[in-house]
Image (cartoon, grey):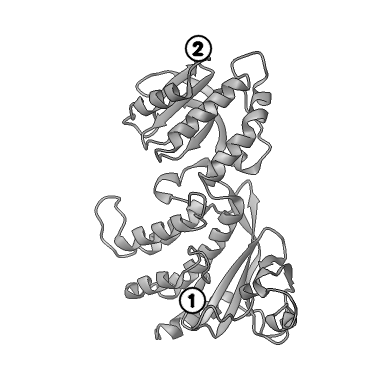
Amino acid sequence: MSESISFEELCSRLEDLGTPAKTEDRSVYWILPMTLGLAKTASARVEVFMCGQKLFPRTAIVRRHLEHGRWKIAESADEFDASRVVLPSAPHFVPLAAFLAVELIKAGIGTRRPLQEVLNDVEPLLELALLRSALGEEHILGLVGELICLETLLDAVANRPEAWSAVLDMWRGYEAGQRDFVIGSTSLEIKSTQLESSTHAISGMHQVEVDERYPSEERLMLLSVGLAPVIQEGQTLPDVVQRILNRLSAGVTKANDEFTPLQQRFLDDVYRYGGTGSRGYDHRTESTSKAYSTRYRSTFTPRLYEMEDEQMLILRHQDVDGLFVRPSSVQYTLELPNLINGMNPAANWKHSVTAMIRKYLNIL
């Protein structure tokens, strides 16, 4: 195929590609034979293939999405070695894939120029595209931290299916401007860190003290969660989501592999997490995506802090009263000690949260 192919023609060719019947297959349109190709999978996701040696991206999000391997073409015995980038199935990602292909051609793919140099030129554009197609690392860590807490809440009512919906109601972290969890008049803020200590970025004093923007709030607790990426062991975001799905299906009869209404609701809430300006994580289509294959281990046992404790030495509204400072604009790093006093943090965070939710739901 000529290197002068237009953006519009690439879009048309990609849209016209047939959808393969088998999950592991793909329909490929070769822009440059066995060099640069665009493909469509059985789930209608869009793939960009760059044939050749393994590539080494410089940015974290491109590393998460770029996968080198041997791939199969639909209804053919043909296989090829290439680096692959997978984009979502939404219609607007078709022109995005075509745009990236055009830029790869401009950068010299298929010429004597080394493929790594071609990627280096195009990577900034690829990074921008991927930032809108998947959760960033910070959001993944935050979501995993919140779901670890949600697991414990569901475990507290494991034998009371009628309470599962009420527990899901308590999770608010997927909504912008909301507390992560609300249990009656008690709020829980979940903070995740990759460090070995409870060190967290704070944006606005409302994150660490009872705030009037939440009228029913009388008590605020902070759950500090340490998560660091590892090569082996650990758990992925899809692992945690699947565990919660399993909890929500216990004892429920469903047809084939269909999700129950409660599971659908949970998956929709997960998808909404961190979705402002980008796509959220869709477990229904992305559970096997390389973008979400990073495994995380706990760097310390989660710590549940009582934020209204007088010995909690943090900045509060009263510290800036009378100053020309807007409390919600204050940003700083919080470094919480392992132990503030005998009651803070809680001796066992799971026991404390379990007792809290069972008391609120009047479960003996």
At x 45%, y 57%, the residue is: 272
Point out the frontmost of discs 2 and 1.
Answer: 2
159 w.r.t. 96: above or below? below
Count of numbered labels shown in the rendering? 2
- What x and y, as percent, mark residue 159? 36, 74
At x 66%, y 32%, the residue is: 56
- What x and y, as percent, mark residue 52? 59, 21
> Label 1: few (<14), some or many (≥20) within 10 Å?
many
Q: What residue does disc 1 label?
A: 182
Relative to 29, is 161 on the left or the right? left
275 w.r.t. 95: above or below? below
Quarter holding residue 196: bottom right
Which image quarter is the C terminus in?
Answer: bottom left
Q: What residue does disc 2 label?
A: 2
At x 44%, y 55%, the residue is: 271
- What x and y, as percent, mark residue 158? 40, 72
Q: Which of the two residues, 252 or 94, is positioned nearer the viewer here?
A: 94
Disc 2 versus disc 1: distance between alpha carbons? Answer: 59 Å
Q: Secondary structure at mark 1?
A: strand
Q: Which of the two residues, 27 or 351, is positioned nearer the viewer here?
A: 27
Quarter holding residue 304: bottom right
Amino acid type shown at disc 2: Ser
Q: Which of the two residues, 130 or 198, is positioned nearer the viewer here?
A: 130
